Image (tube, coloured by chain):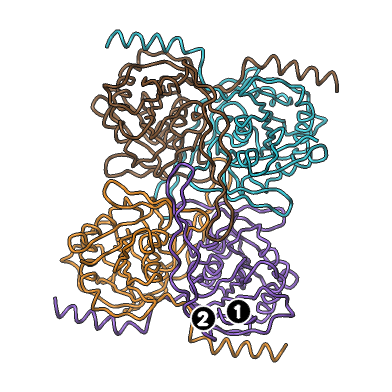
Chain colours: A brown, B cyan, C orange, D purple
Amino acid sequence: MRKLLLSNDDGVHAPGLKALYEALAAHARVRVVAPDRDKSGASNSLTLTRPLALTALDNGFYSVDGTPADCVYLGVNGVWDERPDLVISGINHGSNLGDDVLYSGTVAAAMEGRNLGMPAIAVSLAGSHHFATAGRVAASLVGAADSLSLPPRSLLNVNVPDLPWEAIRGFRVTRLGYRGPAQRPLPVTDPRGRTRYWIAAVGENADDGPDTDFAAVEGGYVSITPLQTDLTRHGALHDVQGWLDALSRLA
Amino acid sequence: MRKLLLSNDDGVHAPGLKALYEALAAHARVRVVAPDRDKSGASNSLTLTRPLALTALDNGFYSVDGTPADCVYLGVNGVWDERPDLVISGINHGSNLGDDVLYSGTVAAAMEGRNLGMPAIAVSLAGSHHFATAGRVAASLVGAADSLSLPPRSLLNVNVPDLPWEAIRGFRVTRLGYRGPAQRPLPVTDPRGRTRYWIAAVGENADDGPDTDFAAVEGGYVSITPLQTDLTRHGALHDVQGWLDALSRLA
Amino acid sequence: MRKLLLSNDDGVHAPGLKALYEALAAHARVRVVAPDRDKSGASNSLTLTRPLALTALDNGFYSVDGTPADCVYLGVNGVWDERPDLVISGINHGSNLGDDVLYSGTVAAAMEGRNLGMPAIAVSLAGSHHFATAGRVAASLVGAADSLSLPPRSLLNVNVPDLPWEAIRGFRVTRLGYRGPAQRPLPVTDPRGRTRYWIAAVGENADDGPDTDFAAVEGGYVSITPLQTDLTRHGALHDVQGWLDALSRLA
Amino acid sequence: MRKLLLSNDDGVHAPGLKALYEALAAHARVRVVAPDRDKSGASNSLTLTRPLALTALDNGFYSVDGTPADCVYLGVNGVWDERPDLVISGINHGSNLGDDVLYSGTVAAAMEGRNLGMPAIAVSLAGSHHFATAGRVAASLVGAADSLSLPPRSLLNVNVPDLPWEAIRGFRVTRLGYRGPAQRPLPVTDPRGRTRYWIAAVGENADDGPDTDFAAVEGGYVSITPLQTDLTRHGALHDVQGWLDALSRLA
């Protein structure tokens, strides 16, 4: 029986996580290790300044006082003897499209699984109603995961429209789109007269062409984007070398 | 006069930040906005659940009760009317090589600048002694930044050996190397008898060939790696599409 | 029907809070507002540097990303139009005896209710098994609360032995006992070689005479201690005045 | 030479702490252990869920990633072999009058010293300008501390008007005054449309008669209030016993 590790960034009590568990538990051995509170926006952060507490809850889920990446690290890497076959993160409350993937704790949880050698899938729902749809998508992908061969340092980022299953128009393989720069911070005055700044909403879409994840979800399709964790801009190595050579000649 | 925004992840009181400021302040207009405490490992996380406090310190630096990405967002995007020309993050206490870039707050600060449309450089010292060397490296790169043309969504990750300037053997353009999976967590028992888990040290180098950042720094060279913030694994789009088509035929 | 506000410091998902709710919900209108995670040891701390999020959970409880005192402040003071008649905090997992009351978030939640003008009771179980016993104690005290007249700035601190109801030997009114100084901190070395210090276990009992809360619980009795929130040491005003006068003569 | 431990709740970089150090360092051996960031409102909270990092700064002060009480616990209780003779906390930025003492981290730091067996003084400035005045007050009290005999579990809470030394009218021994209930929370809407609540400003003074700390500071006098850490309301023990007896007869 396939062994799955589930995590998320909305926290161990989030409905999306429960929906994911319910969609997968019948056909696999499922362990759930998730943050004890909402860690949306945690990105890949790991907790290095203190040890982590792992608490078994009444429903069998494990709660960690840390980040999504912390949870997957503990779940994959040695608290238990047996390693999972696959790491699934989600179902996120809200989409993770375009630039979001750099900030998302949901994607980071999947990346951490990938960095530890596991195949990994991040699943997000572009809304907060149809978690069952996203659960069914997750179950389909998990069922077929053995036949997918991805290059090393790769994972899948899946976004599901917030629609009933019957209204989903199909699946699309997409590239990430991109948003423009975020809006300016919103200043607020606290009750003691001090100014503070809220990080504002994300920018307008700057690149949401037909092959992007934005366009797929907007059109009612499940978006599947293969992501990489190798951040080297290989195509720029030559140009940077040229620049460096020019500098040296000048020096 | 060129306008620079400096940040880091070791916190506004870190010696590496002061060294960076001292290396750059003579030839540019420099603003410093950095976290109020050590945020190493913060990755790209942004603070969305509360507004941020920005505090002017006696030395003219600004302190923020948030992450490195928060600091750059506030510094670039509208607390002040004037935008910087360039974002420099560092000098990190310790190297940021290979997989480190996914977790590093120093690299994330530069990425945030890049996402907001600025050229950006992350600078790390592979140790804790020769910050002046890394400061001199930063000053050289900043001085030449106008002549470097990088593709969109790119930035430079710079690692400097912990050596006196005279002992540096040169500059090398590199790709990221990779470490193997991190070691297993270290269990500890707290004074009340409860087990907790420390995230362990990073794994052994798994890919540190001669063209990597690992090898450059090990050999006494300054390593310069162009990074990208587009995480799409473009080369895998075709294979994932084939997999999806096969699934559909089966369904 | 009596209106109760319940809170705790072990967090909104703690079994002790659920037990308290179940013991009281049949005979009163009960609102529950509790921290989203374990805040044991939070003392009277209030969150002043950021606004608080109040989240309605599926079970009707409210979760706050703050301290026990934050929760009671929000629950009593104006999020809802109707104020409670009584604030009950607990059931704490573990006793709150002697010096504990200065550090306890459970006692602080009751104090916050008291400071906002409500009668208030803190309930703790000296263990983790017989929450139903403590629930029954709480229900008895709440039922009789109207006939108790306490001076201003007073509240009740209740500790219940971890025994079946039948094994409880009775109720005792007690004074706080005192422990000796806490043990020395426990140094630990983290996986990166840095020393850190755990706060050690509490000290040995230094004053646990027959009229103390320590002795009552130890003997199988429910301990009820009236607490005050006026910290003036009235009995020392005269001596400090004498000391000050002597200083002035010398000056 | 007298050995002093200094701490505060405004953080190790706060001007008030530096002013206190400068006022005392000439005539005593002074160690400074303070939180790494602003911990105002931390009350007596102790950090029990993780070990604490103690960092030596360039100026010789020690920084702790914890609360004021954590700092004093580490500073008094065994990181160093030698114990201090006296714990001084402050100079707080802003007064700590009346009910404030229950929430104040400055007062809590002094209480922690007291709980560990040291004489202790908390010093606050009712403003942010004349730290030198408060420093001079602290030096006077420290110089005379040997001749003051307080009962066990007692400490001094000192508030200094924000005036030049020459404008101070004298010293007064006071009791704590009291404020009325805090104002209602201030709702704010975050940039994502969610309501959050700021804890509002403190209430109006409800008890600021001529013998209170409020009145002394308002009148230009240094206020000295002896505080106790025994929270038992001894005067109510009899009444609670009567109430309990009545309950038993009814049962």
Q: Nearer the viewer, residue A92 or D202?
A: D202
As drawn, B204 above or below A143: below
- Secondary structure, mark 2, is loop
Q: Nearer the viewer, residue D30 or C154?
A: C154
Q: Is residue A102 left or right of residue B80?
A: left
Question: Alpha-carbon neighbours of circle 1 within 10 Å: few (<14), some, or many (≥20)?
Answer: some
x and y, in percent, of residue A37 in the image: 40, 44
- Residue type of the residue flagged with mark 1: Glu
Choose top left, top right, bottom left or bottom right for residue B99. Answer: top right
As drawn, A240 above or below C187: above
Q: Quadrant of the N terminus of chain C?
A: bottom left
Choose top left, top right, bottom left or bottom right for residue B89. Answer: top right
Choose top left, top right, bottom left or bottom right for residue C34. Answer: bottom left
Mark earlier in primary sequence (1, 2) = 2
Q: Which residue is mark 2?
A: D208
Residue found 69% across the figure and 24% down from its top:
B224
Q: Which residue is mark 1?
A: D218
Q: Is residue B57 left or right of residue A70?
A: right
- Residue type of the residue flagged with mark 2: Asp
